[in-house]
Image: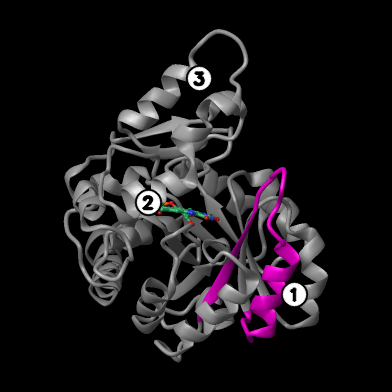
Amino acid sequence: MKTRITELFDIEYPIVQGGMMWVGRAELVSAVSNAGGLGFLTALTLPTPEGLAQEIERCRGMTDKPFGVNLTILPAINPPPYQEYAQAAVESGIKIIETAGHNPEPFLPYFKEHDVKVVHKCTSVRHAVKAQKIGVDVVSVDGFECAGHPGEDDVPNLVLLAAAKEQLSIPMLASGGIGNGYQMAAVMALGAEGINMGTRFVATKEAPVHDNMKQAMVEADERATTLVFRTLRNTARVYKNQVSSKVLEIESLPGDTDFGDLKDLVAGVRGRERCIEGGDIEDGVWTVGLVMGLIHDIPSCQELIDRIVAEAREAVSDRLLSLLD
Ligand SMILES: Cc1cc2nc3c(=O)[nH]c(=O)nc-3n(C[C@H](O)[C@H](O)[C@H](O)COP(=O)(O)O)c2cc1C
């Protein structure tokens, strides 16, 4: 499976685990990279840049394969010290950074200077084209199916990837809604040179989340997510439960939504403590995507990646080859 992605990152398979708040830790990242894919540690999961440097060292102790660091740049009243996190990653020898959220342009000269490759994750064709123009190496195009922030345009991947491909010359990763190799073959046919997955990697043995959450993902189908923060134009796809339903109720009240009314319900620390660590899947907001409908087990990352590769090959040899007859 050679593509520009495997060449650029020196990995066996073009299968990437995108940054995931609270989940993208050394256990998962090293397991993905050891299985031939590319894992990303999530910088802001660590409370300080020094903590990130330690996590990078911990991950190095668990794999000698390439892995990267995700830097999610979000608007905040008291923003975290992004530049210091970037510096901690680069000074620790990280050569691949995944940026997401805001335009990564201010960080690019620093990354280029240190020979760091940048994957920028974006949810629209115009942002992908802009990212290419400012000099990122790869775009990860995240369709409406994705967990987390799908943007405000609501374009699913069957159209989004094909439309992005028409305008991109740099390699594109397909992200959002992918969980098996048949889908991998499909998005490669649309012009992607690899896949990025979040949700599917959460339901693996190595993901550092409570078993109840993994089990809930196995039991749920593709209708078990909902979109919160639409009224704030900061849409997020999360698990449909009591808390996200309450958020939607507040958002549906007449007038503008005041984030202050949602703050306690949606606090990241609540989702982490009660759901991700505590295992009460109803008592906080947690990020997950439509691909839950295709998750039926909790394999190791090695089993998952091997299976995806085998399915993708089967899709081509058994399902698509007849196109050549
Ligand atoms: C639990 C969880 C947390 C996530 N946190 C982040 C994050 O902090 N930064 C980011 O760029 N993307 C984040 N994502 C999005 C993933 O990196 C990826 O783009 C997305 O999950 C792809 O869609 P999929 O879940 O359908 O595979 C998160 C996804 C999940 C499931």
Residues marked 2 and 3 touching at CB (< 8 Å): no
| Left or right for 243, reference 194 | left
Q: Where does the N terminus fall, quadrant-wise?
A: bottom left
Question: Which amino acid is tagged 3?
Answer: Glu
* 3D distance between C-alphas at marks 2 and 3: 24 Å
x, y percent for residue 136? 71, 65
Residue beneath disc 2: 273
Q: Which residues are magenta?
A: 67-95
Q: Is residue 212 above or below residue 84?
A: above
Structural crowding at the residue carrying mark 2, measured as other residues with C-alpha within 10 Å and reported as few (<14), some (14–19) or many (≥20): some
x, y percent for residue 165? 59, 54
| Left or right for 182, reference 268 | left
Residue 140 is a magenta residue: no
Identify which residue is drawn at 54% across, 34% down: 235
Q: Where does the C terminus fall, quadrant-wise?
A: bottom left
* 3D distance between C-alphas at marks 3 and 1: 39 Å
Question: Which amino acid is tagged 1?
Answer: Phe
Residue beneath disc 1: 111
* First-in-chain label (2 vs 1): 1
Where disc 1 sits, the SS reads: helix
Residue beneath disc 3: 251
x, y percent for residue 175? 47, 55
Circle on res. 280: none
Question: Which amino acid is tagged 2?
Answer: Glu
| Left or right for 154, reference 77 | left
